[in-house]
Every structure is written in structure tokens, then in C-alpha cells.
Image (spheres, grey):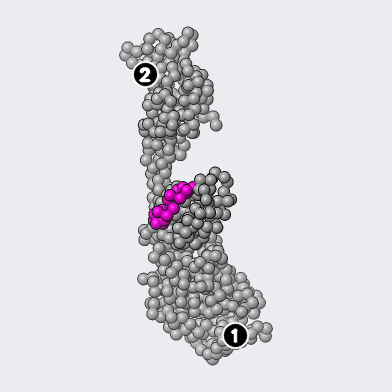
Amino acid sequence: MRLLAMITVVLVTVSGCGLFESEPGAPEITHDFLAKLASGDVRGAAGMTDNPAEAEETLEKFRGALKPEGLSSKVDQIRKNGETASEASVTLDWDLGKNRHWTYPAKFDVRQEGDTWKVHWASSVAHPKLAPQQSVRLTELKPDPAPVLDRDGTPLLAPERIVSVLLVAKEAGDVGAVSKTLADALNPLDKAITQQTITDGVAKTPEGQAYQVAALRDPDYQSVKPAIYELPGVRFSSQTSLLAPSRNFGSQVLPAVRKLVENDIAGDAGFRIATVDAQGNEIDELHSKAPEPAKAVSTALSRSIQAAAEDAVEPVTQPAILVAIQPSTGDVLAVAQNDPADAQGALALTGRFPPGSTMKAVSALAAIQSGKATADTPLPCPGKTTIDGRRIVPNSSEFDKGTIPFRSAFAFSCNTTFAQLAVDMPADLLTNSALSLGLGVDFDVPGLTTITGSVPPATDVVERAEDAFGQGKVLASPFGMALVGASIAKGSMPVPQLVRGKETKADKQPAAPPAAALDPVRQMMREVVDYGTAPQLKPYGDVRGKTGTAQFGDGVHSHGWFMGYRGDLAFATLVLSGETSTPAVDVAVRFLKAVP
């Protein structure tokens, strides 16, 4: 790339030293030399010296080390030294990119040889401290990345030293023996590392190159160093990386946050320039600029709540998920999955499942808001009912409560009651009620890919009845159901937030449901805990919620749900193939027990 030369001549009159109106060759050769140097024409610049070969070699190495994006120069003064020589004083400003500049004064002689003026070559033409047989080296000084903090200022991602353990086969001798020793030392830290994986990895690595066996946090490296440090063919390298408190902490959200803010936390790199001898040994520092770390990035997440959520789902053998949202702000407090759930992907945020009876919170709101029932309206709760002569809807184990208040039908989770209520509902009533609670709203949350769910209008009576108790075509993610709980707690849909300063966009902002309709739903959710299907939660404060058991596939197996809130903490739990809501409620118990 050709670089533009910006050369300004400043003529300074000095007593006793005349300028070269009478000797125009000296200023012209000075200007031309600098212009060629700035443009990247090293050979042309060297050809204007009295030692072109040495000048070209030195200047090529000099520019090659700097890799400049540009060079500007200023001729400060030209002094006459006799009739055939002069001294040029100049200022060189190397543009090193990324807002980095290296500016310094330099001097060189310009001499007349016959009718021609030439720059008298010396290494100091490039820099005053550059000696013969020397060059320069530029080293970028990167700051440690800034930490990513939780809502309370506690680090979620912090800079840590990572040591890479590398194996070079041709230096190892007996690769099998070295691999076994490495595996014995590293397998307790990472079960995926075995002698076989190491030998397979080495076999696939091009000859002469190093295979990365492991990347270890420094404390882990120190624990295995005595066993592996002296192994033949084993090398080590280190770097600083931004890491979570533990390997899988926040695995469904923190990697995306790290990627989102990588430029924000990088800071401004500094640099250092030094002279080096022919062997690359440093001689003298010429310039340095310290790196400037970035400011920490804050998130809506809570490290303590995330830890409690992860501890709550970890003991479950089936895939288990918990999402927590703060109703007052929309802050996403925690997104947790256990290992079996992680193996299936981002279920917490984008998985779509029938919500089962947690949907009854939406259906209850629709029934009360439309005037079809109040919390105290007596309604039948038979063991089973037939919808439109086509579909038999049963309660769980076909329990029969007779005629009971609507609030009790909610607490006991009567499918039959809700199915009959839905028969006379408009096709889009459930759709609109769900939207008012955030279910079906599409969000663009910086750092997260989310799906809340879908509640399509149902013109078919049977489909509408099934939708009312969370079967049919209704789908929801754990994130979506946590948002429903947050919306009920707040009284309107909060907009989910993750990273401070990164605005979330929503494809719609639904109107809040009337308080007169929402207040009874809140009380009915409390009665679920007081005497309904979630009494296990009663010792843990003013918990309000709804359990759910949702059949899937051929209807033989069911997922278990709980959706609800306590104070300014809303959450949803889901246990896939939990068969009943009990495992999901147990997750909620462990979670609330750990959260103040």
C-alpha cells in the first residue's frame, strides 16, 4: 500500500547560519528523501543516499518492524556546514495504526558530491539511537480485558491466566507413554482427556506442530505441574483470558455476553519500541505507551441467584431448567440448565414446550377479564368432560371435586373446569391475554437469543379447550413462562434486560391487563401454595405460582413445570419427562431456600 507523505518545511532563521537560497540542492534532496520514505519507496529513498545498499537494508527492516500505516515529516531546519554540506533537522511522525503514533526528532547530513547532493547515510538517519547492525522491534502491550460484573458489582467474567499444555510428537519420543502420563494427570480435571484422545489428537496434527492437550486455569496448572513439566515434547504457553468462576457457570448466557462486549472490554493497547541487535536481543527502549484498560461492563445477572439456580437444577437426573427475572426491572437474573439439558441446547431461552397447567394463569386472566367468571364463581370440576362431543378431557387421575369456586379449581388444577370455560371464549381471547403477559412477544435482547412462545388464535372448539390448560397448540419456553410470572407480579410486561447500556427491543408493547382482573389471579396463585398443588413451597415466604404437567409426543410421558414469583423475583422451572409437576416444584424449593 502506498502511503501519502505529508511534509512541511519550516524555515527558521538562525543568526550566523544562512539558509540555502543559494544552495537549493540541500533542501530539495531532504524533501525528496523524506517524501520517498513516507510513500514506502524504500529503494528510492535509499538511492538518494551515499550508501544505497546499507540504507535500503536498514530502512526495510525498520519499516518492516513498524508496519506503519503512514509517515509524516516536518523539516524543522537546514543549517549550512561549509560550502558542500548541510545538516537537516527533521521531525518524523510514524502512524502505527489504532491511534498509535511515534514521533521523534532526527538529524542527518546532506553532502554535495560533484554536482549531486546526497543524504549521508548513517543508521541514525532512521532514529538517533539506532546503531549499525541494529533494528527496532515493536511490541503490542495489551491490557487485561475488563471484567464483566453482575448487578451487585461481583465479577461474572474476570481476567485469569490460562496455561496451554502442548505436545510435539517428534520431540516426545514414546508418544504413548507421554500421553498416558498426561492423561493420568489431566483426566481428574477434565474427564474428556484420555490417553486415546491425546494420541488421536497428535496423530491428526501436522508434523512438527504442537497439539493442544488442555487449556488450564493457573491453579489447575500448578496442581499438575510437578507431574507433567519435565515430560519430553511437552511445552507450555500462557495468556490472559476472561473466565467465569467455574467451567460451566452461566454456560447458557455468559459466552454470548462475552462475545457481545468483547470490544467494550478490550481497552486500548499500548506499545513499546526498542532497538535490537542482529540476534534479536534488546538493546535500548526508544518509546513506550502504557495500555489503557477498559471500564468494567455491568449486567443484570446476579451471581448469587445464578449459583442458586444452578445448584437447584444440578441434582435432577432428567434435563432441568430454571430462568429467573426481576419483575420491577425486567432484569434477567439467572439462566440455569443441568448437564442433561445442556446436551440438548439452549432449552431455557429458545426451547418450546407445551406449558401444561401453568397456562391456566393466562386462562384465568382471560376468563376474569372477559367476565366469564370471578374468583368466587362456582364451577363444576368433574373427573372428566367431553368437549364438542369429540374430545374427552380428564383431570389428573380423573379426580372429581364437584362444584367448587373458580379459585379452588385453579388451586387444584382442574383441567375440566378450564376446558369448559374455553368453549365459549372468542378465538383470540387467550392469544391476547397471553400477549399482555409477554407470551408471544418477540424480543431482541443484546447478548441473548430468546423465544417466549406462541398462543395462536383457536377457531376450533376442541383446540381452544386444550389450549386453556396448556396442551393443544400452545407452546412456551422457560424464559417465556418466567416472563409471564414477572408480568403478573408487576402488573404489566417488563422488558427483559441483560447488559447495562445495551437496549432491548420488542416487536410489540402490549397493554397491561386490568388490575381488577389481575389481582384475583395473584391471589389464586397464592392458594396453589396454601392448599393446592404446590404446598412444598409454603415455608419459603409469600410464594405465588402455578404448577403444570404437560403431555408431549404420544401422550405417554409428561414434562413438569412450575411458574411463579416471590416478591420481586419471578421464575419458571421445567423438568423434561418429569411425569408430574413435583420435580419442578422441588427445583423451586431448592432455589428459594438458597435465595434470600
Residue at the far left: name it.
15
User: Residue 563: x percent and y percent?
Assistant: 48, 74
Disc 1 element: strand
Question: Which three-letter amino acid code belongs to the residue tagged 1?
Answer: Pro
According to the picture, the residue beneath numbered tag 1 turns out to be 394
Question: Which three-letter amino acid code belongs to the residue tagged 2?
Answer: Val
Residue at the far right: name it.
390
Which label number is shown at residue 106?
none
According to the picture, the residue beneath numbered tag 2 turns out to be 12
Q: Are marks 2 and 1 in contact (CB under 8 Å)?
A: no
How packed is label 2: few (under 14 Cα within 10 Å), some, or many (20 or more)?
Answer: some
Q: Is residue 128 magenta?
A: no
Q: Nearer the viewer, residue 550 or 431?
A: 550
User: Residue 178: x percent and y percent?
Assistant: 49, 53
Q: Nearer the viewer, residue 198 or 94?
A: 198
What's drawn in magenta, residue-wise?
A: 217-236
Residue at left 39%, top 57%?
A: 223
Q: Is residue 507 in view from this perspective?
A: yes
User: Residue 141: x percent and y percent?
Assistant: 41, 41
